[in-house]
Structure formats: C-alpha cells, structure tokens
Image: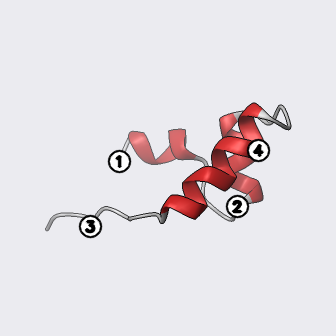
C-alpha cells in the first residue's frame, strides 16, 4: 500500500519559508510551529 503525499498551498509554503528565512527558525522548528511532524522522522519510514 502506497502512502499518499501531502500537498501544501502556496500560502502555507510562503509562511514556512518566512519562518526560516525571516525569523531564523530551523526547518524542524518551523515544521513544529506549523503543526507538522518533524520531517526527518518520516524519512526512515
């Protein structure tokens, strides 16, 4: 069974990018702030 990929709106992507670029968040901090699981933990699955 294949896992379905999530899709994100351009607005969501812009907000995520602003957290990292403008506010100095790490990608993991930005993901947590936006209510996502840590991206790296999903890569091993």
- Looking at the figure, which quarter contains the N terminus? bottom left
Mark 4 vs mark 2, foreground winner is: 4
Q: Quadrant of residue 18?
A: top right
- 45 vs 7: above or below: above
Secondary structure found at label 1: loop
The secondary element bearing badge 3 is classed as loop
Evaluate if marks 4 and 2 touch, with contact meaning CB atoms under 8 Å apart: yes
Query: Badges 4 and 3: C-beta atoms under 8 Å apart?
Result: no
The residue under the point 56% across, 53% down is 13
Crowdedness near tag 4: few (<14), some (14–19) or many (≥20) residues, C-alpha within 10 Å: some
Q: Which tag, 1 or 4, sits closer to the chain's start?
A: 4
Disc 2 to disc 1, C-alpha distance? 21 Å
Instruction: Specify the color scheme.
Output: secondary structure
From the image, state whether disc 3 or disc 1 is nearer to you: 3
Going from N to C along the chain, the mark reached first, 2 or 1, is 2
Residue at left offset 68%, top offset 65%: 35
Pointer 1 residue: 45
Q: Which residue was labeled with disc 2?
A: 34
Residue placed under numbered mark 4 in the picture: 19
Whole-number angstrom distance, CA of label 4 to CA of label 3:
26 Å
Q: Residue furthest left?
A: 1
Q: Which residue is mark 3?
A: 4
Mark 4 or 3: the one toward you: 4
Kindly state the secondary structure of the residue where label 2 is placed: loop
Q: Earlier in the sequence, mark 2 or mark 3?
A: 3
- Mark whose residue sits in front, 2 or 1: 2
Of badges 2 and 3, the one in the foreground is 2
Q: CA distance from mark 2 to mark 3?
A: 20 Å
């Amino acid at each position: 069974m294949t896992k379905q990929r999530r899709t994100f709106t351009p607005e969501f992507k812009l907000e995520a990018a602003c957290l990292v670029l403008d506010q100095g968040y790490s990608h993991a901090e930005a993901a947590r702030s936006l209510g996502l699981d840590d991206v790296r933990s999903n890569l091993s699955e």
